[in-house]
Structures are given as C-alpha cells and as structure tokens.
Amino acid sequence: MIEDYHLHTKFSFDSRQELKELCDKAVHEGIQQICFTDHVELGLENENQVPDFYEREIEIEQCRNLFPKIEILSGAEIGQPHKNINYVKELLQQHPLDLVIASVHTVSEKGNPSKFGFTAENCKEFLNQYLEDLKDVASNCDYDVMGHVTLPFRYIPQELREQFPIEIFRKEYMELFEIIVQREKGIEINTSGLRTVLEETLPNALVLQWYKDCGGRIITIGSDGHSVYSAFSCLETGYHMLKDLGYDKIATYHKRVLSFKGLDN
C-alpha cells in the first residue's frame, strides 16, 4: 500500500491547490491512501493561521464520492502546538480528524529557519533551541506523529552542515525519540528534502536508525506537497528506506486510531 500522509491544499496559507486535482493525480499514480494535513500555525507574531475546517470537510466528502478508489483522510499539521495547548485541545474537539502532525516551523526566539541567517556563530544555538522546542512538543502536546524533525537542515548552507553535522546532535535526538516512543507516538519520513539542495529525506536514514534504536516503530510517509506538482514525489524512496532499516510495516490512522499495514500489501 502506498500512502501520502502529508499534503497541503488551498486551505493552507501557503497553497492554492484544489483537492480534486490531488485526488485525480493520486488515482493515476496508484496511491491508495492520502491525508490532507493543512496548516494550523500557532505562536506567530500576527494572528493564528487556521483553515476553514468546515468548508474543507465538505470538499473532502465530495472527493470521497468522486474518487472511491482511494481512501481520503482528514488531518492537520499543527505548527508550534506547545505555544497554545488549550487552543489545540479545543480545536481538536471541534474538528475530529484522522491524523494530527505536530511540527515546529518557527523556533522560539529564533524564527523560521527558511528566513534565518545561519552563520558559524549562531547555527548550533539555533539547532539546540529547535531540538528543545521539539522535546517540549513531544512531551506536552496532543499529536499522532511529529513532522520533519530535521527541518532546519533543509535551509542550512552546505558548509555549515559540514561544520555542524547532524551526528553531533545524536544525544538530543535520542532524548527526543525516547519521549516519542514512551508516549506511543511516531514520526514521519518527509520526502520534501529530496526536492531541495539537501537531497535527503527529513529525517535521513541515520536519524531514522536512531529512532529505531530507541524502539521507534510508528512511521508515516508524506511528500509535504503543496501543489499537484510536488504531491506524491519520492514516496518510493521513503518505502525503500523503511525496508532497508528492517521495517516491514507502515503506520496508518483512522479517526486517530493507529494500525499497521505491510509495506508490500
């Protein structure tokens, strides 16, 4: 079974993609299960960015009727959920979802890595704060899987990635994964990094091995596509990585209930 558990649509602030177009492409590419995970962004300088879940659910139901060959799930990617835990609780009570991805896009007191000016002097400090935010989310928030847990590396220049390789943060990642595993939550393989100069999944195979070493077994795969052009890209790479690491199942969700399906099903 091939799934894409990380897709954005016109209901995200940074996408204009129609849902029906994504469903049509999924059918043609043989994708069996997709999940729309539009942004809920919290803790920003301006007001929170929240999609119109009611209108989106109407369109999702229309898509389910039009595309019966694929299973279409309703999810959300909540950015910085630790900034307003009570708000997230109320939101999830009002809008029952199949999957909740928890992500950190804006790092405390640092900002968004895509806009941050990384230098030799501030790179390690930024990454340490990012990992502290991840651990805060992992420990205290309501979620199913954590999204792209190596996101800043997508924006750090190559010379700084060589100076501050991810290996030096192994201890911090192991601490993060121990929290996730203890809470019986998971992480995703986000293939968007393969579409950038980083040319790696988020996280890469090394970090996934650390997760497995901590007992991690819950993994989803998503393209993080924001358009019909990036949706479903490089999913096969994620599946091959799981198999190479010795996994034989992938996590799936329905109404936020976890189950597993064989990678070859």
Image: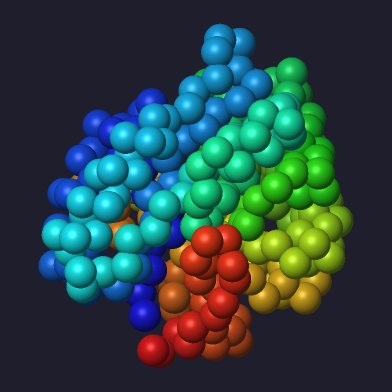
Q: Residue at x 81, y 44 (%)?
A: 140
Q: Residue at x 71, y 27 (%)?
A: 84
- Residue 12 in view: no
- Residue 254 in view: yes
**Is residue 58 shown above or below 25?**
above
Q: Left or right? Give the position of 1 relative to 159.
A: left
Label total for image: 0
Residue 106 at x, y percent in the picture:
62, 27
Residue sitting nearer the eye, 240 or 91 = 91
Residue 122 at x, y percent in the picture:
73, 24
**Is residue 103 shown above or below 250?**
above
Residue sitting nearer the eye, 38 or 146 = 38
Q: Residue at x 14, y 59 (%)?
A: 66
Q: Left or right? Give the position of 26 relative to 81.
A: left
Residue 254 at x, y percent in the picture:
49, 66
Quadrant position of the C terminus in the picture: bottom left
Q: Left or right? Give the position of 103 relative to 210.
A: left
Q: Residue at x 68, y 38 (%)?
A: 89
The quarter of the picture where residue 8 lies is top left
